[in-house]
Amino acid sequence: MAFALCAPQALGQTRPARTKLEPAVAPPASSPALQAVVDKAAQEALKKFADQQLKPEQLAITLIDLNEAGRPIEASYRGDERIYPASVVKMFFLVAAHRWMEDGKLKETEELNRALKDMIVDSSNDATGYVLDVLTGSTSGLELPPEQMKQWQHQRDAVNRYFTSLGYRNINVNQKTFCEDAYGRERFSRGPNGENRNKLTTSATARLLAEITAGRAVTPERSRQMMELMKRDFAGTSNDPDDQAHGFTGIALAPGARLWSKAGWTSTTRHDAAYVELPNKRRFVLVTFTEHQSRVRDIIPTVARVIIDELQKQ
């Protein structure tokens, strides 16, 4: 019986030298004034949605102010809490895929580009599974014997190792996203109680999005390509409450603003990672995660409105 621990070549990969690392980037500075903005946004959301039983432990926010080029400033509310990210994790797979392609570890093909587009633009879980397959060579399937499962898991952890090498901590990005549930080796990898589920913090997510917007994710050209996939047109209306342009941060934006984002939602979570350019050229990254409030779609735009109002006063 074949267990399909796929060699990289079987999925269009080659075996080059080890992955190159991006240049080190100084972490954003902190600011009491910006922290006050984030704290106000959190408190106003908690107050507004108290009748929906929104609790502090169900909300996390990170804001990176990019108003001054080369001098990002960050503030957060529970920004280091590990939270199941739903489809926001796809942004990490996107960056990893571009790093692999840049290094020659992964061949850029029409099919891979189609999958990357569908993964980000449409948030396709099927496309995401394919992308993670080609990144790691660890395909889904029936259960494996212990030693083979150990090797399979080592391959699956390739994306984790990449982001660890860049200084990312307190995250886990080694699981596929599913519409229903995981089975076979995917379930064993995730753990019977979800011990090894994907986990992100709003601060780690904001860092990655800020690096993409600054052209520091892999290369400037590859960052531009990633941005093109995340560009959202929030003009007009949508009948889909989970539309990434109209159902999240975009609700809070006025005409003339510009939005790039990756949202995620499940039956228990509702998240958005957004880069916003306001009409007055103010630029910022805002990542908002909510847990156990997935049906309350106004929490994320409420946070965004408060932050926009406060930033425009500064």
Image (cartoon, grey):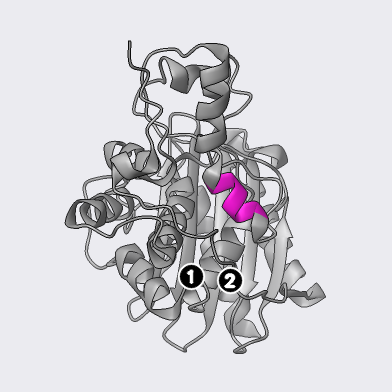
- Seen at 51% across and 20% down, the residue is 148
User: Could you tell me if residue 241 is visible in this image?
Assistant: no
Residue 194 position within the rendered picture, expressed as x and y whole percent measured from the top left: 58, 22
The residue singled out by tag 2 in the image is 22
Quadrant of residue 120 within the rendered picture: bottom left
Residue count near mark 1 (Cα–Cα under 10 Å), binned few <14, some 14–19, many ≥20: many
* Towards the viewer: 92 or 16: 16
Amino acid type, mark 1: Val
Which image quadrant for residue 35?
bottom right
Is residue 27 shown above or below 123? below
**Residue visible at 59% across and 80% down?**
66
Q: Residue furthest right?
A: 32
Residue 8 appears in the picture as rendered? yes
Q: Which residues are magenta?
A: 159-164
Q: Earlier in the sequence, mark 1 or mark 2?
A: 2
Q: Magenta includes 162?
A: yes
What main secondary structure does the magenta stretch of the protein show? helix
Instruction: Calculate the distance from the C-alpha at mark 1 to the C-alpha at mark 2.
Output: 6 Å
Which of 259 and 126 lies nearest the eye of the viewer? Answer: 126
Q: Is residue 151 above or below residue 310?
A: above
* Image x and y of residue 166, in percent: 65, 61
Proximity of marks 1 and 2: CB atoms separated by less than 8 Å: yes
Q: What amino acid type is highlighted by mark number 2?
A: Glu
The x and y percentages for residue 15 are: 43, 52
- What residue is disc 1 on? 218
Question: In the drawing, does residue 263 fall left or right of residue 233?
Answer: right
